[in-house]
Amino acid sequence: MFDDRPAFGVRVHALGGVTVAEIAGELDIFAAGRIVARLDSLIQARCPDLVLDLRPVTFLDCAGLSLLCRLRNRVLERDGRLRLVIDEPRFVRLLRMVRLDDAFEVLEDLTPAIAGVSGPVAGGGGDAFA
C-alpha cells in the first residue's frame, strides 16, 4: 500500500526559557497520536513557555484541534504559556468557527514569541524532524 502523505514531524528548539516546537505535515488523528507524548514531554516543568510553530502544517482537523486544546489545558495547569504561530488564514478561520480563537494566543510570525530571548540554544541545538 502506498502512502502519499506529506512528510510529518516535530522539530524542537529551546532558546532561553522558550521552547519552540515546529510541526510539519498533516495534523490529523494519525499525526496527533504520534506526537502527543513528545509534546507532553515539553511541558513537564513548572511554568512552561511553549510556542507551537504551525506554519509548516498543511492540514488541520478536529483531532489536531483536540490535541491543541489538550496541550493548552496542560500548560495552563502548570501556570505556563502556550502560543501558536499560524500564517494560514484557513486555520485562523477554523479556530474562529469552533470558537477557539480566544482560547489561544495566535501569532503570525515566530519573532514576537522569541523577542528579547537570548542565549545559546539548549539541548544540542534542536532535534531533527521525528
Image (spheres, helix red, strand yellow):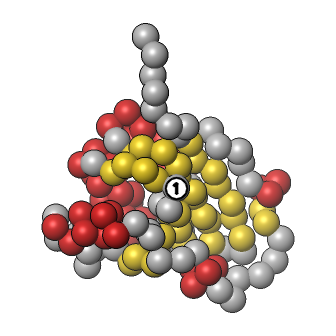
**Residue 79 sits in quarter:** bottom left
Q: How many marks?
A: 1
As displayed, is residue 38 above or below residue 103? above
**Residue 109 sits in quarter:** bottom right
**Residue 114 sits in quarter:** bottom right
Which quadrant does the C terminus fall into? top right
Dot 1: what SS?
loop
Q: Name the residue under label 1.
A: 56
Q: Can residue 53 be seen in this view?
A: yes
Q: Can residue 40 be seen in this view?
A: no
Residue 65: where, in percent of width, then height?
29, 54
Q: Which residue is drawn at 32% across and 63% down?
A: 91
From this viewpoint, which residue is outermost toward the top?
Answer: 1
Residue 38 as seen in the image, left or right of residue 61: right
- Disc 1 crowd, CA 10 A, few/some/many (<14, 14-19, 20+): some
Residue 82: where, in percent of width, then height?
45, 70
As displayed, is residue 119 above or below residue 125? below
Q: Residue at x 47, y 77 (%)?
A: 108
From this viewpoint, which residue is outermost toward the bottom?
Answer: 116
Work out whether residue 85 or residue 42 is closer to the camera in this orientation and state it. Answer: 85
Residue 17 as seen in the image, left or right of residue 44: right
Q: Which residue is drawn at 72% across and 74% down?
A: 16
Work out whether residue 26 or residue 77 is closer to the camera in this orientation and state it. Answer: 26
Residue 33 as seen in the image, left or right of residue 63: right
Residue 25: where, in percent of width, then height?
48, 45
Q: Which residue is drawn at 66% across and 74% down?
A: 17
Kind of residue indicated by mark 1: Pro
Work out whether residue 82 or residue 47 is closer to the camera in this orientation and state it. Answer: 82
As displayed, is residue 83 above or below residue 116? above
Residue 46: where, in percent of width, then height?
53, 68
Which quadrant does the N terminus fall into? top left
